[in-house]
Image: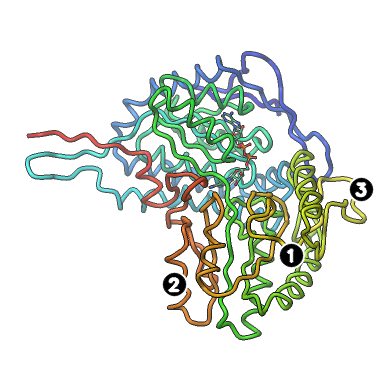
Amino acid sequence: MPYRIYVDGEWIAASGGEAIPVVNPATEEVVAEVPRSGAKDVARAVEAAAAALPAWAARPAAERAALCAAVAAALQERAEELADTIVNELGMPLPLTRLIQVGAPIRTFASMPEVAAEVGFEERLGGSVVYRDPIGVVGAITPWNYPLHQIAAKVAPALTAGCTVVLKPSEVTPLNAFVLADVMHEVGFPRGVFNLVSGTGPEAGEALAAHPLVDMISFTGSTRAGRRVAELAAAGVKRTALELGGKSPNVLLDDLDDAAFEDAVRKGVGACFLNSGQTCSALTRLLVPRERLLDAERIATDEARICTPGDPRDPGTRLGPLVSAVQRDRVREHLRAAAEDGATTLTGGPDAPDGLERGFYVRPTVLTDVAPQARIAQEEIFGPVLVILPYSGEDEAVRIANGTPYGLAAGVRAADPARAHRVARRLRAGQIRINDGAHNGLAPFGGFKQSGYGREYGRFGLEEFLTTTSVQL
Ligand code: NAD
């Protein structure tokens, strides 16, 4: 199928006629080509979104939310096609793709009626009425690692809030966004309310962030690109929400018995390696009491060796390839540099994994003898790489945990839940898991420090797209 951009309710050709290849990371084959939109295409999409805004913003929130729920139902019907598409462009193992990459965005769209009902769109305040109004035209720029999930986190609440949207998905994994646009069309969103332009960050992304008719940019991606987007948006005094990178700690406290400690290390390795380590909130620094360092090293090594990388379509595979050759090479370079800096590689390392001639695979790696300030313990690697850091006493654990430029997520494991909670409250991170607390798709998600600002999901996520008008009576 020839991919076209979706603007003002129609599928149209992008102006330049150039294309971006989409590569299957397990086979290295080009699976599709999508339009490489430029500033002209972005402008058409933004103008359509601006024209559609007044009528869409005037619709009752419950109606807007109901259309999002219809999107969830239509995505569900195409769940298998979506899973297949995302495995092709991202390389995450198929069962996990079904569960997370397809399941989570469907749940986000489906949650909109419940979430909209929680927001008070109008309230009396003394002699005034305060309305909570949509911020306006939203430019949504999203990454490749949980592609449809990140899109849903912006598009569903923005539309429910009464905003209109221009989406610029990652050029690395854009295909799922085309399925979504098809679904949006099918369920009957009015023309111009949702628009899709595929393209690169420096071209389509920057044009969107700089366009004068865009009122807000909601960005998820690297800290580097987020900084650039915020600079461009600042020139037009636009609101921005930035969901950026992380280097999150997983703190195991010293009251765990042997069995609980082993379980915590094994689960910590598994969580770090989810999606081949390409998870912004991955707990990539395992903090253990110094007297248990040797045990942690032994257990983590054993667990990492179980996670052999392989074909994402093979039912036994837990770890697929990395998304691209660029990403694979970046991770291997980090591993080489860490070894040169004195880190000990317990398992894994920069060499290609055995028996995989094709595909962007990296060996799952566990490193120790790493100083908390070393580059490998400070920078986001975005590959299957775990660093073990010993600490002496709770205060040092907290200091190391908080001692990076990031603050996206954290984990705390302890036998005493009250103690775990006390330590968790000292951590500067947007979401913290205590003793493997279950994921909550309606709880706010976002960062401290250079992990960004703004929150996604549930009521907090919807409120990001609202502003207020007060009318004095
Ligand atoms: P990236 O920053 O390279 O790209 C993200 C998006 O921004 C893409 O659509 C890209 O085209 C666009 N972009 C790139 N440069 C741009 C520019 N100059 N102007 C405008 N847009 C630009 O990130 P990525 O490699 O796709 O994703 C990985 C990063 O995303 C990691 O750092 C990860 O931690 C982060 N991430 C954060 C969250 C979160 O919620 N905090 C979630 C997922 C991923």
Instruction: Assess disc 1: are there few (<14), some (14-19) or many (≥20) residues with their C-alpha within 10 Å of its C-alpha.
Output: many
CA gap between label 1 and label 2 equals 27 Å
Question: On the picture, is 350 further left or further right than 93?
Answer: right
Residue beneath label 1, please? 368
Q: Is residue 335 above or below residue 166?
A: below
Residue 421, which numbered label?
A: 2
Q: Residue at x 78, y 58 (%)?
A: 342
Instruction: Assess disc 3: are there few (<14), some (14-19) or many (≥20) residues with their C-alpha within 10 Å of its C-alpha.
Output: few
Ligand 1's quadrant is: top right
How many numbered marks are there? 3
Question: On the picture, is 100 further left or further right than 163?
Answer: right
Disc 2: residue Cβ within 8 A of ligand 1's nearest atom = no
> Which of the two discs, 2 and 3, sits closer to the camera?
2
Tell me the SS state at disc 2: helix
Residue beneath label 3, please? 357
Q: Residue at x 28, y 35 (%)?
A: 133
Q: Position of residue 195 (x, y in %)?
A: 50, 28
Q: Position of residue 254 (x, y in %)?
A: 57, 80
Q: Is residue 461 above or below residue 155?
A: below
Please state which of residues 296 and 375 is positioned toward the viewer in this rendering: 375
Please state which of residues 14 and 319 is positioned toward the viewer in this rendering: 319
In primary-sequence order, the first of circles 1 and 2 is 1
